[in-house]
């Protein structure tokens, strides 16, 4: 099992931030070629975020830059200890009513809002036109060997580590930020082993079905999603994080309301973070 995950709903307490702004951090790392890079990233990336000089004024920059710093730190370790592993990664940093995300590779984060799946990012795959151009400009190549690969090896074009494939496999993360209105149901972070088997719209149906069976209890929703990916034929390591931004019972009530369907404009909204719970599930 080369996946690692981090859940820090009390981010402020860990770093002594006392400015009355709620913060929470979540991440999934999907290692390859060994577990060292994933272990290192799960241990150090959030520390680099919390100690970054821009964590208060510009958290989006702090998150994105911390990926690059973690990559540089691990490459130094990898060179010294002759490590060849790498890891994809995706992180979500919630600051007040803002969601900041950053990622390398094909681990993903998605949002469900008023019963609808919302795509937040595009994975770093070598077949992407911009990624292929970047790799070829650096002197590398993208070839097809059961899937598109960088220099005939890795199926992702950005990652922490992979010292033998730098600079073609970049450690520069992409990032984005979103305003949270209180109408968001939950975040889901997962590795490619999940998203290769389960489409975003299927996530919505699976979670709703779980809430109906448990009468609005969100516990073990992540386990249900992992099981569904296995049932759909995924043979990869699978890690799923579910972060509820509203009470699951309220989500269920909205979806079952006879007079409206999920996603209508007049669905009730609440202030962000009146409720926040999270859980993770993983399987080999």
Image (cartoon, rainbow, N blue to C red):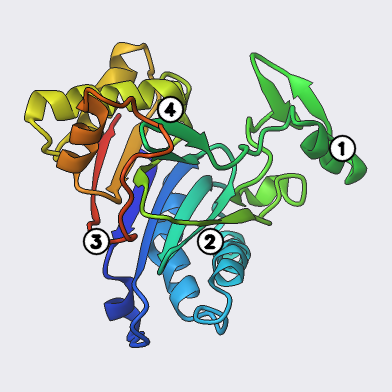
Q: Is residue 143 left or right of residue 216?
A: right
Q: Earlier in the sequence, mark 4 or mark 2?
A: 2
Q: Is residue 79 left or right of residue 166?
A: left
* Quarter placement of the N terminus: top left
Frontmost of labels 1 and 2 is 1
- Tell me if residue 17 comes above or below residue 44 in the rendering: below
Structural distance between the alpha carbons of marks 4 and 2: 29 Å
Frontmost of labels 4 and 3 is 3
Q: Earlier in the sequence, mark 3 or mark 1?
A: 1
**Percent of width and height locating residue 260:** 31, 27
Residue that carries the numbered disc 3 in the rendered image: 274
Q: Earlier in the sequence, mark 1 or mark 4?
A: 1
- Residue under the point 31% across and 21% down: 205
- Residue under the point 37% across and 87% down: 19
Frontmost of labels 4 and 2 is 4
The one nearer the camera, 8 or 179, is 179
Tag 1, which secondary structure?
A: helix
Residue that carries the numbered disc 2 in the rendered image: 81
Residue that carries the numbered disc 1 in the rendered image: 133
């Amino acid at each position: 099992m080369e996946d690692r995950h981090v859940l820090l709903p009390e981010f402020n307490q860990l770093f002594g931030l006392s400015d009355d702004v709620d913060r929470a951090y979540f991440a999934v790392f999907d290692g390859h070629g060994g577990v060292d890079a994933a272990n290192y990233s799960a241990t150090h990336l959030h520390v680099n975020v919390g100690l970054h000089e821009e964590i208060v004024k510009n958290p989006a920059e702090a998150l994105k830059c911390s990926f690059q710093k973690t990559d540089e730190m691990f490459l130094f370790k990898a060179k010294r200890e002759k490590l060849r592993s790498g890891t994809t990664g995706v992180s979500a940093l919630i600051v007040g009513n803002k969601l900041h995300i950053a990622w390398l590779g094909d681990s993903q984060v998605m949002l469900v809002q008023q019963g609808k799946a919302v795509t937040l990012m595009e994975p770093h795959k070598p077949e992407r036109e911009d990624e292929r151009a970047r790799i070829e400009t650096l002197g590398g190549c993208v070839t097809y060997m059961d899937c598109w690969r960088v220099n005939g090896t890795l199926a992702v074009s950005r990652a922490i580590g992979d010292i033998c494939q730098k600079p073609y496999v970049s450690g520069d993360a992409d990032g984005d930020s979103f305003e949270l209105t209180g109408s968001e149901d939950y975040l889901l972070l997962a590795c490619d082993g999940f998203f290769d088997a389960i489409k975003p719209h299927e996530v919505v149906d699976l979670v709703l079905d779980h809430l109906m069976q448990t009468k609005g209890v969100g516990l073990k929703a992540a386990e249900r999603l992992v099981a569904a990916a296995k049932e759909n034929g995924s043979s990869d390591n699978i890690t799923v994080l579910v972060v509820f931004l509203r009470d699951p019972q309220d989500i269920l009530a909205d979806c079952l309301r006879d007079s409206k369907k999920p996603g209508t404009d007049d669905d009730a909204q609440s202030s962000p973070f009146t409720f926040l719970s999270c859980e993770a599930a993983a399987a080999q």
